[in-house]
Image (cartoon, helix red, strand yellow):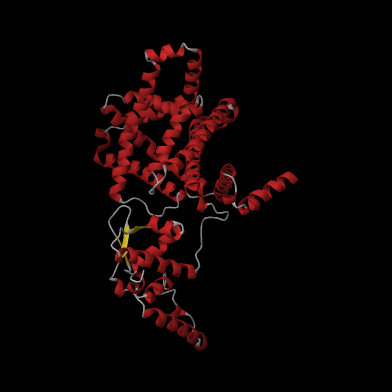
Amino acid sequence: MKLFNRAQEYLFNTLWEVDSESLSPWRQRGIGVLRIAYLIGRDLATGELNLRAMSLVYTTLLALVPLLAVSFSVLKGFGVHNQLEPILLNLLTHLGDRGPEVTERIIGFVENVKAGVLGSVGMVFLLYTVISLMQKIERAFNYTWQVSENRSMARRFSDYFSVILIGPLLIFTAITLTASITSSTLYTRLEQTPIISWLLQSFNQSLPYLLVILAFSVIYVLVPNTRVRIRSALVGAIVAGILWQTVGWGFAELVTSSPRHIAIYSAFATLFMFIIWLYISWLILLIGASIAFYHQYPERRWRESRQLRLSNRLKEKLALAVMINIGRRYYQQQAEWTLPELARRLNIVEQSLHPIMDKLVEAQLLLRTDHDPPRYIPGRTLEQIDLSTIIDCIRQADEDKIANPQRLPADPVIDQVFDDYQRAATDELKSKSLHDLVSTN
């Protein structure tokens, strides 16, 4: 019990009080690993990752057949559509004896999807289902990376269809290349050498892990609507890939060793096990994305929850900082700021900064460009933007006809204090424009 209490004290307090900068590189990495592990556990305990994984399970069940039907059509165009079933069987190998049954059912559904039978409306619905799955996956990863802006509509279609159309070909190419190497004469000769044979066997055993890690790395780099470093994506993919294969092995053992418990669900047993494995897979994938995020941004490893509540004072200062930074670049004719760049510059998460940017855009103090991701420029000339307007934009945010100061009961004392305070702030700031500040630096 004492050991447990000491471990708990270390995780909750001592671990976060250590100045890692004063430690050796190896101890810094160890502290970083422990902090990330704690943060992943905290994120799982809050339930947000679990909810998003369950949401993706529901969408996957709806979109799986349409997605495979599109992939089937792409592979059929190259005459290699027969490879779809082995690929799917490998992905469902962790279902044990249920894997071939699920694969056969899915392939049967896919083969029944015919353009002539569905008609134009059915094909549109099929494509919409696939796009909605990709969009929900992007939103889940954007949440993990604390990105509040999704891709534009044009970029969604281009990026999503690139993945849908090119992905099956890349998978088939990898499998074909692996099969060609293992069946080559040189490979056969090398197997006869004892040391090289051991190395090749080790490589063959680790190949499933390597392919999963490679696939996860590509997902972590391409799906979030932000720049992900390859090194961080690889770190998250290694942990998620090993976890996926290991948990999959345990899940397969559970399925094969518990036939009586599974028999309780009778005809629903196969579907039930498939849904559970989908949930586990998505959860592991999101955990890997969280690891990649915390690895890329060590400054975001906070002991407290990352859902920040900004004070009114902080909101006002952020609004001023945003306008001054954007106005300065505009004045100096430099490249415009994007939301992720501003968030990093101001050391604030995008989710907290995004509402402030929205209010400034609504007040026409800022304009969003049509770039992808959007960039921000002043909505008026710098001389026309006085500092009191910026502060009032944030102070009066979310007021409407129902919720506003005028609806409060009249009180001469309170009204006088409030008006004096408001007048003093306005008089002090109204004489200063944004141009005055950016032109002096």
Instruction: Specify whether residue 368 is in view.
Output: yes
Number of on-image labels: 0
Q: Residue at x 46, y 85 (%)?
A: 420
Would you place residue 173 above or below residue 308 in this image? above
Instruction: Let me know if residue 410 appears in the view.
Output: no
Front position in the image: 83 or 394:
394
Q: Where does the image place residue 415, in percent across and percent down from the top left? A: 48, 85
User: Farthest residue in the right direction?
Assistant: 2
Quarter of the picture containing the C terminus is bottom left
The residue shown at (43%, 74%) is 402
Q: From the viewer's side, name the closer residue of 235 and 171.
A: 235
In depth, the one of 72 and 206 nearer the eye is 206
Left or right for 131, reference 51: left
Point 59% across, 50% down: residue? 22
Vertical side of 299 occupied by 170: above or below: above
Residue 139: % across, % down: 41, 49
Residue 87 to residue 18: above or below: above
Q: Quadrant of residue 183?
A: top left
Which image quadrant for residue 182? top left
Image check: 354 left or right of 120? Answer: right
> What is the residue that sits farthest to the bottom in this orientation?
412
**Residue 206 rendering spot, x and y as whole percentages:** 49, 26
As drawn, 32 above or below 399: above
**161 relative to 269 in the view: left or right:** left
Q: Residue at x 52, y 88 (%)?
A: 413
Provide residue 318's location: percent of width, then percent of height.
Answer: 44, 66
